[in-house]
Image (cartoon, grey):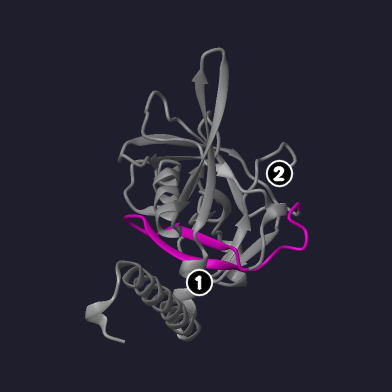
């Protein structure tokens, strides 16, 4: 076949044929490369979160609902969640002191926070450093003989440098679910991992959850990719393993 004497119709058909063959070859190569890629690469690709956002658009007297699909990568979601939870995290020191005793997390708009009970012994009053560096008083509100988690009241006052954290629904946690640890003695240090074991009874005051990410700083916080608090590091949980965290939940009068 002489390519120089092809008609316009034949040129169009030839172009379509070449495009079709090229697309098939590209698909075969892509599948082959994906099957040989490391697990970390395929896991990152597969862990893209799709969310559907409903936007109400007024149209005369009726409102139309427009659905948009947003593709959010794990890295972006984790970074945003960390930034949000950082506003809830406090660093607790002795009153007037500088050395860190434990970290903690504020859980409601009244300034109630959770921390490691064993790290806050010998006194009832401490200082807390908020996310913007502001130092405020802390008073022990509740100690429990059955729980390694202590409840404290943070005098947040009129400061706007904080926000309460949200709790994860323990019944919806799954093995292998991605989690993030926020800890560190000085500045916030983060690491990621997955849930390794689930508690058999999350209602137990001494219940713990184990993750593949470890922490040695009392009061370090374990959160989901959506910024929900799962647990905190306590002296008692560290006796089990560096990856063990006390289940975080709303305090009650019996705790």
**16 and 132: which is toward the camera:** 16
Q: Residues within 10 Å of mark 2 (few under 14, many from 20)?
A: some
Residue found at the very far left of the displayed protein: 4
- Residue shown at the point (41%, 48%) measured from the top left: 80
Look at the image and tell me in which quarter the C terminus lies.
top right
**117 and 204: which is toward the camera:** 204
Residue 97: % across, % down: 33, 46
**3 and 125: which is toward the camera:** 3
Q: Quadrant of residue 190?
A: bottom left
Q: Quadrant of residue 247?
A: bottom right
Q: Earlier in the sequence, mark 1 or mark 2?
A: 1
Q: Is residue 81 left or right of residue 3?
A: right
Q: Quadrant of residue 232?
A: bottom right
Q: What secondary structure is found at the residue carrying circle 2?
A: loop
Q: Is residue 100 left or right of residue 67?
A: left
In this picture, which residue range is highlighted in magenta?
176-203
Residue 34: % across, % down: 47, 80
Q: Is residue 146 left or right of residue 180?
A: right
The question of residue 202 being in magenta is answered with yes
Which label sits on residue 252?
none
Which label sits on residue 255?
2
Residue named by callout 1:
43
**194 and 6: which is toward the camera:** 6
Q: Is residue 222 visible?
A: no
Residue 254: % across, % down: 75, 41
Residue 41: % across, % down: 44, 75
The question of residue 213 being in magenta is answered with no
Residue found at the very far top of the displayed protein: 61
- Residue shown at the point (54%, 59%) measured from the top left: 233
Q: Is residue 50 visible?
A: yes
Q: What secondary structure is found at the residue carrying circle 1?
A: helix
């Amino acid at each position: 076949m002489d390519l120089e004497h092809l008609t316009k119709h034949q040129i169009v058909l030839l172009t379509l044929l070449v495009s079709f063959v090229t697309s098939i070859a590209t698909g075969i190569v892509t599948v082959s490369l994906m099957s040989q890629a490391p697990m970390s690469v395929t896991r990152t690709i597969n862990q893209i979160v799709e969310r559907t956002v409903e936007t109400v658009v007024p149209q005369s007297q009726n409102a139309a609902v427009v659905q948009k699909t947003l593709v959010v990568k794990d890295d972006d979601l984790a970074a945003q969640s960390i930034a949000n939870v950082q506003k809830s995290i406090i660093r607790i020191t002795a009153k007037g002191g500088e050395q860190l005793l434990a970290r903690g997390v504020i859980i409601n708009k009244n300034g109630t926070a959770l921390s490691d009970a064993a790290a806050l012994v010998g006194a009832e009053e401490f200082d807390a450093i908020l996310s913007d560096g502001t130092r405020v008083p802390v008073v022990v509100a509740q100690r429990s003989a059955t729980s390694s988690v202590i409840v404290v009241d943070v005098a947040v006052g009129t400061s706007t440098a904080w926000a309460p954290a949200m709790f994860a629904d323990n019944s919806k946690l799954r093995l292998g679910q991605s989690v993030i640890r926020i800890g560190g003695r000085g500045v916030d240090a983060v690491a990621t991992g997955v849930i390794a074991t689930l508690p058999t009874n999350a209602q137990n005051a001494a219940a713990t959850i184990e993750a593949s990410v470890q922490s040695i700083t009392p009061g370090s916080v374990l959160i989901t990719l959506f910024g929900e608090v799962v647990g905190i590091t306590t002296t008692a949980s560290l006796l089990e393993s560096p990856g063990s965290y006390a289940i975080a939940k709303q305090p009650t009068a019996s705790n």
